[in-house]
Image (cartoon, rainbow, N blue to C red):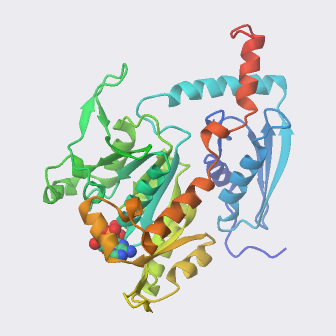
Amino acid sequence: MAEPTVPPPTADQVRNLLRAVIDPELGANIVDLGMATDVTVGNDGVITIGVKLTIKGCPLRAQIKNDIESRLETHPGVTKVKIEWGEMNADERSAVMTKARWNARENAGDTAVPVTTRVLAIASGKGGVGKSSVTANLAVALAAQGHTVGVLDADIWGFSMPRMLGMSERLAARKVGDADKPKIIPNERRIGSGLLKVVSTGMLVDDESTALMWRGLMLTKAVEQFLNDVHWGELEYLLIDMPPGTGDVQMGLARMLPRTDLIIVTTPAVSAQKVAIRAADMAQRSFLRIAGVIENMSHFTCEHGSTYPLFGEGGGATLANEIGAELLGQIPIENAVAHGSDTGEPIALTGDSAAAEAFRDIAKKIISATVPATDMAGCSARLLESVEVALGKKPR
Ligand code: ADP
């Protein structure tokens, strides 16, 4: 086997990466649950992981396998991932159940982003490539499919979500449950049978120019505060509009929400694609998984039907290829995209243009790549239930 060109990650780094693999039923990651046992890393980049399932025929096995492989195989220096499956004995099983119960209680806190929420951070190497437009349009497209979608405007100084989503009311704060401090309550907007829950610094300040006041604020601290102090409640997706380029925020996110997937937005221009590679590189170093690349401002089609590649060609595909991610879609340049953003009605909501369709197609891809929480045929939850029945804590 060929020696990898970069050194493989250490066993500790692998364990860190595996912390992003969540057992959806037990609501915690497989390392803290004690499911990922031995990790060995060969000099040739081959990683062998022992994974113990609660029961052998666990239907979540395929999902856990996929998740482990997709998180490790894209990491520099990794040539192969081998999983050795095992089954827990009775003692291990009861220990994992205790942990799972404890975690469930911890996660039930009002402030945390629910553990089943799919977190997608929309990032770009530099400003002006349409990262915020992509966030706003994907948010409404996901909500229009009946989902509850949170939007966190982490572009603290350059926030645009209030304008793009037509939601500029000031944020309210109130005490939730028996918490001692009031929580920020996201502003809500119904989209069909779905719901948007949006938080932005633009909803804390009176006008866009007051945002300058936030200059002194440490970006990572602000994002951390938003993740901690917001009462998100039920949430299927959380889209985070990242500030352009910064590695600090990515590192902070990786620490607080290790299961975050990054979507990188680029234009077809080679220069934009090069800076986007840096964003992808930072993501990989902070152990965030890249869900895909979106090429925005792909081409312009005039009223006579002729197409012009105004900002070059191929940047999205080249970037996706280079970082081993999927090209999720290409959004053409359309006046209506800019107009929708300026009027608070993103084009993906009602538009019938190529850009509107492209946004909706990407949302569909995002939805189909997730296992909806309600459809999970679980072994561990059923197991938990049977343990409780056996202990006489639950009626048969
Ligand atoms: P970023 O968040 O990367 O700084 P924005 O989403 O604010 O970028 O977009 C920059 C500008 O380009 C905005 O005026 C926006 O309306 C416009 N824009 C973005 N995408 C498109 C598109 N596909 N077609 C036309 N205008 C676009």
Pinpoint residue 108: horizontal percent, then vertical percent. Answer: 50, 28
> Relative to 362, does residue 277 appear above or below in the rendering?
below
Residue 122 in the figure: left or right of residue 207: right
Instruction: Identify whether 80 is placed above or below 224.
Output: below
Q: Is residue 307 above or below residue 263?
A: below
Quadrant showing the N terminus: bottom right
Residue 354 shows in the view:
yes
Quadrant holding the C terminus: top right
Instruction: Name the spot of residue 87 as percent of width and height, x first.
Output: 85, 35
User: Which residue lies at the image location 78% right of the left edge and 12% below the top edge?
Assistant: 390
Which residue occupies 49% across, 69% down? Answer: 358
Instruction: Report the residue at 53% width, 71% height from top.
Output: 329
Please provide percent x and percent y for residue 258.
54, 49
Label count reads 0
| 229 horizontally vs 167: left or right | right
Q: Toward which corner of the image does residue 288 lie, by quadrant?
A: bottom right
Quadrant of ligand 1 in image: bottom left
Front residue of this view, candidates 204 and 369: 369
- Name the quadrant containing residue 335: bottom left
> Can residue 24 be seen here?
no
Residue 24 in the image, given as x and y percentages of width and height? 64, 39
Q: Is residue 84 above or below residue 122?
A: above
